[in-house]
Image (cartoon, grey):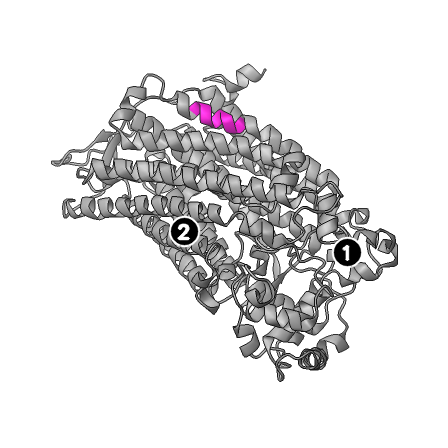
Amino acid sequence: METGTQIGQAGIGSERSDYQLFTYDEGIVRMFVWATAIWGLVGMLVGALIALQLPFWPANLGEYLSFGRLRPLHTNAVIFAFGGNAIFAAVYYSTQRLCKARMFSDLMSRIHFWGWQGIIVSAALTLPLGITTSKEYAELEWPIDIAIAVIWITFGVNFFMTLKHRREQHLYVALWFYIATIITIAVLHVGNSLAMPATLFKSYPVYAGVQDAFIQWWYGHNAVAFFLTTPFLGLMYYFLPKAAERPVFSYRLSIVHFWSLVFLYIWAGPHHLNYTSLPEWAATLGMVFSVMLWMPSWGGMINGLFTLRGAWHKLRDSVVLKMYVIAITFYGMSTFEGPLLSVKAVNALSHYTDWTIGHAHAGALGWNGFMTFGMIYWLLPRLWRTELWSQKLATTHFWLGTIGMLLYVFSLYTAGVTQGLMWRAFDEAGRLTYPDFMETVVQIVPMYWVRLIGGLLYLSGVVLMLINMVKTVQSAPRELPDPAFALPATAAEHSA
Amino acid sequence: MAKQFIRTDGVHRKLEGWPLLFSILIGVSVLVGGAVEFLPLALVSSNIPRISTVTPYTPLEVAGRDLYIREGCNNCHSQQVRPFRDEAERYGEYSKPGEFVYDHPFLWGSKRTGPDLARVGGKYPDLWHVRHMEDPRSTSPRSLMPPYTWLLRKEANLEVLPAKLRALSRVGVPYSEDDIANATATAQQQAQQIAAGVAAQGGPAGLESKEIIAMVAYLQRLGKDLKAAPEFQQSAGVTP
């Protein structure tokens, strides 16, 4: 991928006209990496607090820190602050290299960075104050929604102009996934956020009832698809072959699974509304497309895991590859579980229970979290040009995270199935076995404690990563000049 | 044909050199599914059959609904009864599309940490709700729900209601100009009635200006319209 000649410390004394010189903006990547780790810690701390609030209600600390207000803060923080900054770090690092071009505008990159952090801070302030639209993963009120659209478009323009000025003829598969992300998130965000303001902090969506529910889950499901899946697949396609020092397993598979994933995912939203007042034909369409999605999803998993063919021995020494293997395995598991849960007969049992939360965290902790950690451990020595402070600490992070998420996921599977079965249980006389809802709640409280322990283990791994980061950065050289490259002018030409 | 497309020197390889066309094709691919599913919902009225008794929320109920949203009640309570025997036994008649035509936003929820609330209107007296919000364990021992004591303390903002009803009317809720102009007074009147009832049942006096009364008004409305609908009287037999 990087065939440009890196210029050594001495540099090329005179700029020769038949060479094009260019640098990569690594400062922006370092900023996004820091933001990823710090917001990850914050978002998961809030997660631990709300996990405690479920079995132990006195942990609801008054008006501003009660479960109903903090749960959206947790989801927004981990998806858009932790996940978002991780995506941007990956995009800014890999796009420049895949295009052999610096990002189009350093200013736009900084506007993107600081604008996004400002949006996160405004979310952290407004959500505890109870300023919310109530729509899941789209809780932020209309002024912030406008800011998100502006910053996202800034990001998009910066990205597409970089593509336009690239020095590489063909777009690598990671870039396809980034393009799909940028376009689709813009469409989803605008489509779901259309609302009529009543005051500065209160608006009502233009859609009502059934239509609002449909639009919300068209958005909600595809936020999972195009914010937590496609950009992370792009990340995988760039960083996994780098870390494994192996080319991607199959070019053809990447074409087939990319286009089928992008086309099919959008249809799957209504599986969140099985057996509700949404017309049945829509829910059935959602279910059918969800089941079809299994294949393109596993296409990504297979392309990832098979890239390691002949390189499995490298796992022993590479915490990065260990992280990626767990991440891709969890991707495969949760993209099998997703279609399973969308099947009406299963959904009738699982819906409204903790099974859904377990499923979401298999994807979030396993796939998104571990892909991000792997990327960070791979980037740290490269971005700060020094050794990782402690491999041992990183390996401990790996094990704490793995054990933590297994405890987390399996406790919630147990809680979900248990409660779902209790809700529908009838005795011989044809009466509800558990007519008092409370009985079905008390039953699963022990599982809530196990989930909290699992979450805390996972969180402690993130703390170790932050310590490792701080220590690594402390040992970095004082000056970190942007890496410079030269390409013969003829090789740098491309047809846009 | 397909093989030529995905060959390493095939058509797709060419496409990878044209980011603009590549992006347009992605845009088209992602728009198809949403359009095919949403347009019939928006355009074909038989998808959402109307129910004669479903009317817009009163101004006080709008205020209460916005408190329900502010506190994030929908994070733990659904408002959607599925057409299953156990849910009919536990909650009542299953939910109909026509019940939600004035719901901006919808509040169906996706998790039942607590029970469904679609049919909670009229299930308990007003005083029960006041006690329950103040201290959930006073009415439901072993409950996990947080207390919402501040609802009994804070003044409800009813002055903002004309602006809220105006915005709702702009997205299609049929409030008249009079409804909008008198929203605050109408809400105060309803609040006084409810507060007087709470005091008469032995609850605290002087709640008429507090947020809790708006919340009670909203909760007591849930499911009421369907229960009043003549077309669903027969199947109401499963409701306890």
Question: Closer to the camera: disc 2 or disc 1?
Answer: 1
Let me know if residue B176 appears in the view: yes
- Residue A301 located within the stretch drawn in magenta: yes
- Residue A459 located within the stretch drawn in magenta: no
| Dot 1 alpha-carbon crowd within 10 angstroms: few under 14, some 14 to 19, many 20 or more | few
Q: Which residue is mark 2?
A: A81
The percent coordinates of residue B6 (x first, y second) are 51, 19
Query: In which quarter of the view is residue B103 placed?
Result: bottom right
Q: Nearer the viewer, residue B232 or B66?
A: B232
Which chain does the residue under circle 1 lie in? B
State the residue lying farthest toward the left. Answer: A10
| Cα distance in 3D space between marks 2 and 1 | 47 Å
Q: Amino acid at mark 2?
A: Ala
The percent coordinates of residue A219 (x first, y second) are 58, 47
Q: Which residues are magenta?
A: A296-303
- Look at the numbered disc 2 and give the secondary structure of its residue: helix
Question: Could you tell whether B66 is left or right of B147 in the image?
Answer: right
Q: Which residue is mark 1?
A: B240
The percent coordinates of residue A356 (x first, y second) are 55, 43
Type of secondary structure dominating the magenta stretch: helix
Q: Do circles 2 and 1 both sit on a common chain?
A: no
Which chain does the residue under circle 2 lie in? A
Question: Could you tell whether A281 is left or right of A79 in the image?
Answer: right
At x 54%, y 59%, the residue is B142
| Dot 2 alpha-carbon crowd within 10 angstroms: few under 14, some 14 to 19, many 20 or more | many
Count the marks: how many? 2
